[in-house]
Amino acid sequence: MLATSSAARSLLSRTARRASALGATRTMASIEPYADYGKSVFTGRVADEYLKKHGSSADILDDPSWTTTHADTVANAVLDWAVDRGANTYCHWFQPMASSGVRHGQTGQVQNMMMKFNRSTNHVEFDSDGKMLVKGETDGSSYPNGGLRATHQAGGYLALDTSSPIFLRGDTIFIPSAFVSYYGAALDEKTPLLRSNAAISKHGKRLLAHLGLDTGDQAVVSNIGLEQEFFLVPRDQYYRRPDLQLAGRTIIGRDAPRGQEMCDHYMAPPSLANPALACMQEIQDECWRLGIPLKTRHREVAPNQYEFAPLYGYNTTQVDQNLMVMQIIEEVSARHGLAALLQEKPFNDVNGSGKHNNWSIATEDGTMLLHPGKINKATGNPSAFAVIMSAIIAAVNEHGDLMRMAIASPGNDFRLGACEAPPAIVSTYLGDDITFYLSHFKDGKGEGEYVPQTKMLDLGTHEVLPFEVPAEDRNRTSPFPYGGARFEFRAVGSSQNVSMVNTVLNTIVAEKFAEFADAIDAGKDIHDLARETLNENWRVIFNGNNYDEAIQQELTDRGIWRIDSGVEAIATLTAQKNVDLFQKMKVLTKEECESRQHILHDHYTGTVDIEAKCLIDMINQHIIPSVKAAGVGPLSDLEAAVGTLKAAVAEIHSAEDSYKAAQLSRVLRLETMIDIRAVCDAAEEVVPANLWTLATYKELLFLDSHT
């Protein structure tokens, strides 16, 4: 990742030297608290120290071939490091499909002690070698596979991913790994992302060469930064909500008298009167030692909603780290008497949570392809930025259906288009400045370099002097806005493993880079190609308010991809153009596309099945008894609702295939269950508080008022 431990230490030591030069004494603000940064990650200085004891150095880790040439050396160094850190166990750490919202940590692992018995002395000895480190085998029979393996073909094979460093937590070494079947079919989230990285590197290098930059042996890499939103609620009240415990969201619940209508939560001071701040500080501390720099923390829009944001880095490392961040959030919150909610929409009528995916591409030495000044200078081509942007714009316009598929998590049903997340219409925001530049470029009115503009704000005060701001404002209503050297995919769900999101972004852009390179190889003028591409795909650019319903209809009429249903979005994965795309870029086979569609539909259906059964139990075991005890409330409607839910669940279970089951589940969730929720909430409104046995929104939210 770019935010390396050595970079952090370098920054901190420069700060210390600057303070020393000024004659200052560092007391409260010391670099000492940062000394443990990355000590639990086998990379950089940490790896170098132990590899040198075995006649090598951390430099060998830069070349993936170490898994064949130096595997035993690395294994011995990792063992020494582990023992020094108090660890005696290892696991290959992988990412099964369809884990969001249900699997703790969203990963799979079998933890094995690094030990063996000496047959001569019967003494216990440490055991570690290169073969054990770089690959493993496990039973793959109980993981979602979508038909990629038969019942009698249960082998799951694990191979170390050299792009993401080995790390240590507690007594266990975690080895990030790909997970595939006996025949090499991807059974995980990671493998397609790694393949898409290869695609964008291969074709990005080709296009850069045509633009004037020979990258040599350096790869083109995809970097991301992930903004993680979540809720913290009192744990004792959490235990009074079966729906939160089992489904991650409140299926029923009357609004509290107060919500977010006063705009009083967003970026408000973290209160010292409740445990949330201490919880977040401990989360940051744990992550810091794992080499995860959670730089930013703040309160979000809804009551009890918070956000962490790290420094950005290489995509596979960032995905792995984000999975660990979510796990740490859940585990640390329990130690503070809190429960963390990572689901996209845990509460009705207040904002849900997202995970903004800031995506960029660069050469390995840091030349950013989406930074106009840097890429134009590196290529010596004033139109390089325009050419690259034209390819990305075409990718979004042609494959907006796949972008929508990638964010079709069950929880996003309740977020997209609700004035808290962008609508399910996939456009891109560039800002007036870049749009003006590209408009002139495509119309042949100029080929000069794009230079981002700025402006000065003068507040008319003596105390605050005029200051510079970018020429472009933020557009939080766009699903895919350009933000200066990066695009921000804003519609991603908070509970998601973002591997598929970034697999799609890499693959659709790699295809366009390949098409550009092929056309130029065939004699096409690069500027003419970019102009034609912009003219053909210009409709996908929109700089206005995506929340405006009239505008949404206008964008729909333009022919921009709009898929309101997550179930239908998932079904686009096997559209012929998309299968052809993934096969051509060598990211997914036809069979892998089909299996993932099947798995995603099953995941949606399974989520709704849990929610519906929770609702049945809550009505039978809580709401009906409360209504009877109070002698008020819609008793007959509640009893009828139970029958309706049971019939709907039975119909889903008898559906002919996973697609039909998911379609029925969506109707149950977004129509039937919403109607039944209204009945339940009407009961909560009239039943006296002392007879209502479920935790209310008033008790779950507003930590400042209750702790």
Image (cartoon, helix red, strand yellow):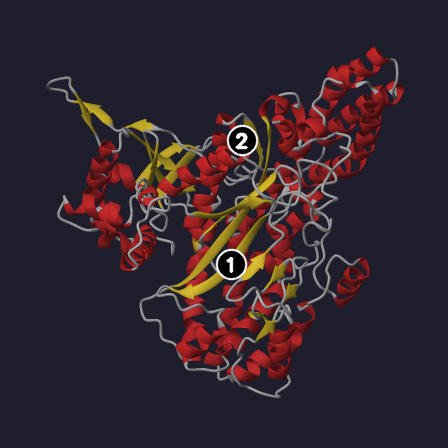
Say left or right for 207 vs 493: left
Q: Amino acid at mark 1?
A: Trp
Residue at image point 69% right, 31% down: 250
Q: Left or right of 552: which side holds 102?
A: left
The reply to whether residue 501 is in sight is: yes
Determine which residue is flagged by label 2: 275
**Res 588 seen here:** no
Closer to us: 677 or 184 = 677
Q: Residues within 10 Å of mark 2 (few under 14, many from 20)?
A: many
Amino acid type shown at disc 2: Pro
- Quickly name the residue at label 1: 359
Q: Residue furthest left?
A: 120
Residue 683: x and y, percent? 83, 23
Mark 2 vs mark 1, CA separation in Å: 33 Å
Looking at the picture, tell me which residue is in the foreground, 703 or 564. Answer: 703
Q: Nearer the viewer, mark 2 or mark 1?
A: 2
Query: Which residue is farthest bottom?
Result: 445
- For mark 2, give the secondary structure: loop
For the residue pair 174 and 276, the one nearer the viewer reads as 276
- Give residue 254's position: percent from left, percent from top: 78, 30
Where is 346 relative to 46, above or below? Answer: above
**Residue at (46, 63) in percent of width and height:** 361
Q: Position of residue 484 (x, y in %)?
A: 53, 66
Q: Residues within 10 Å of mark 1 (few under 14, many from 20)?
A: many
Count all numbered tags in the image, as a single digit. Answer: 2
Residue 156 x, y percent position in the rendering: 41, 36
Left/right placement of residue 565 relative to residue 282 reads right
The quadrant of the picture occupied by the C terminus is: top right
219 to 500, vertically: above or below? below
Q: Which of these two is toward me, 96 or 267?
A: 267
Q: Secondary structure at mark 1?
A: strand
Q: The N terminus appears in which quarter of the rendering?
A: bottom left
